[in-house]
Image: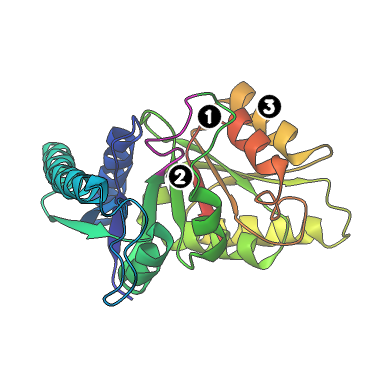
Amino acid sequence: MSEKIIAFVDGSIYATSVCDHAAWIARATGAPVIVVHVLRANGVVPPEVGAPAPLGRRSGVMEELSALDAQRARLMGVQGRALLDDAKALLEAAGVSDVTTELRQGDLLSIVAEYESQARVVVLGKRGEDADQAMEHLGANLERISRSCRVPVLVDNRAFHPIGRVLVAHDGGVSALKAVDHISRSPLFAGLEVHLVAIDIEAPAVEKRLSDAKAMLAAAGIVAETTLLQGQPEGVLGRMVEERGYDMLVMGAYGHSRIRSLFIGSTTTATMRACRVPFLLFR
């Protein structure tokens, strides 16, 4: 697998944060960055050849709408290239020399899937450019991508802050083990403070799993703290991030346990709202 950082930018206030986080990863790992902007399909779809003309065709209104859509598509392309140019300039100013940009059109989920084979991480903002700025609204594609993406997904908050303390939600499952293994191998976490927490897990083996994870990190030179807590995961994690000043939350994106199933139903929104830090998600 190639080691590229795939950063998705749009016209939202999160785009600069996406570039800053991508630059942080690139500086630590030496990986190249591909910045991608996806144009959304838009406009009036012309009738199939040989099909009856739709109502309104004779009035000329459909032709005018088609012309407007063509102009809108051209302007969206111009805007997309400008976004990519600005993103590349931000990354280069942050010390990243290997940056390429790609303008794509289509379904975001499908396009993300195309990059998986060459990606070490996918970086995107918590909300898209059309999202309501109220905290309870999340990007429409975030859950879809987190459920399906087979490489780590870094979900960024509004602004980049230096990352020194990392909270890892650990339930002993496959996603959690994958996260710990990634942390132990990645130069991104060298020198960072890591805290492993299991929440409301009743399995008697969970304490040993935490101990094993701590040992794995110690073998990689990472000193980790472990804690077992009770309560609602979103509330506990939110309080820990806020009160103890963690800079990133690492967790499984999808599964059947209470932590790994945070992307089902309203728990996702509650957790994202409670934790105003970047999320590194593993499936």
Q: Position of residue 217 (x, y in %)?
A: 55, 57
Q: What amino acid is found at the position of numbered circle 3 in the picture?
A: Arg
Residue 79, label in figure: none
Q: Is residue 31 visible?
A: no
Q: What amino acid is found at the position of numbered circle 1 in the picture?
A: Arg
Q: Is residue 214 visible?
A: yes
Q: Earlier in the sequence, mark 1 or mark 2?
A: 2
What residue is at 44 percent from the left and 63 percent from the top?
A: 185
Q: Considering the numbered disc 2 on the image, is that residue within a helix, a strand or a loop?
A: strand
Q: Are marks 3 and 2 in contact (CB under 8 Å)?
A: no
Q: Earlier in the sequence, mark 3 or mark 2?
A: 2
Question: Which residues lie in the magenta part?
Answer: 125-133
Task: Please give the residue where the numbered disc 1 appears in the rendered image.
Answer: 276
Q: Is residue 53 above or below residue 98?
A: below
Most frequent secondary structure within the magenta stretch: loop
Task: Please give the residue where the numbered disc 3 appears in the rendered image.
Answer: 239
Q: Is residue 167 above or below residue 211?
A: above
Q: Earlier in the sequence, mark 3 or mark 1?
A: 3
Task: Please give the residue where the numbered disc 2 appears in the rendered image.
Answer: 155
Q: Quadrant of residue 229?
A: top right
Q: Position of residue 84 (x, y in %)?
A: 16, 45
Q: Position of residue 112 (x, y in %)?
A: 38, 63
Q: Considering the numbered disc 3 on the image, is that residue within a helix, a strand or a loop?
A: helix
Q: Residues within 10 Å of mark 2 (few under 14, many from 20)?
A: many
Q: Considering the numbered disc 1 on the image, is that residue within a helix, a strand or a loop?
A: loop
